[in-house]
Image (cartoon, grey):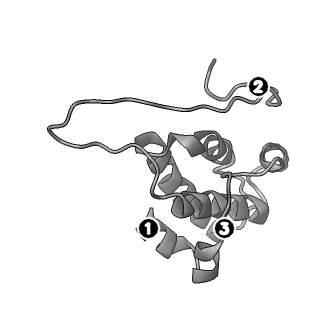
């Protein structure tokens, strides 16, 4: 996470703290980007967006499942990102960097101990996890 944050963020962004990986407008931003389509997207923005979301996808599938909903929403717009969605992707990376002390740790030759927490919200109109 630290290396990726240094690649995509400036120092002021790295000093920012967020308590959640995304705000309430993410789903609407993704829907608007998908409705607009990929034809009017700046190729440089698309490349930058795909790189940052790719880094975040790796993080949430290996050690940081707490940001998986936000990253899954961002991944829906891989071919039609907007500057606002890029800013949302930066926010997720800022959150991951600011909370880098938490996550799944894999330690060799130690007994397996699994614990977890969840905070469900019923405001989401449809599930992105399949349940």
**58 lies above or below 94:** above
Residue 39's image quarter? bottom right
**Mark 2 lies on residue:** 126
Q: Secondary structure at mark 3?
A: helix
Left or right: 104 in relation to 21: left
**Mark 3 lies on residue:** 45
Looking at the image, is mark 1 or mark 2 nearer the viewer? Answer: 1
Dot 3 or dot 1, earlier in sequence: 1
Q: Which of the pair 56/19 is nearer the observer?
A: 19
**Mark 1 lies on residue:** 2
The reply to whether dot 3 and dot 1 touch (C-beta < 8 Å) is: no
Residue 45's image quarter? bottom right
Dot 1 or dot 2, earlier in sequence: 1
What label sits on residue 76 in the rendered view? none
Distance Cα–Cα, label 3 vs label 1: 22 Å
Residue 117, position as x, y percentages in the image: 55, 32
Q: Secondary structure at mark 2?
A: loop
Counting every numbered tag in the picture gives 3
Distance Cα–Cα, label 1 vs label 2: 33 Å
């Amino acid at each position: 996470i630290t290396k990726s944050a240094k690649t995509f963020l400036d120092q002021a962004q790295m000093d920012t703290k967020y308590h959640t990986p995304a705000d309430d407008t993410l789903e609407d931003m993704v829907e608007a980007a998908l409705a607009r389509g990929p034809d009017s997207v700046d190729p440089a923005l698309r490349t930058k967006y795909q790189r940052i979301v790719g880094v975040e996808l790796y993080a949430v599938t290996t050690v940081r499942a707490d940001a998986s909903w936000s990253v899954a929403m961002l991944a829906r717009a891989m071919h039609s990102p907007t500057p606002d969605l890029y800013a949302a992707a930066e926010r997720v990376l800022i959150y991951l960097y600011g909370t880098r002390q938490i996550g799944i740790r894999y330690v060799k030759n130690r007994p397996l101990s699994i614990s977890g927490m969840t905070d469900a919200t019923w405001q989401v109109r449809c599930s992105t996890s399949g349940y």
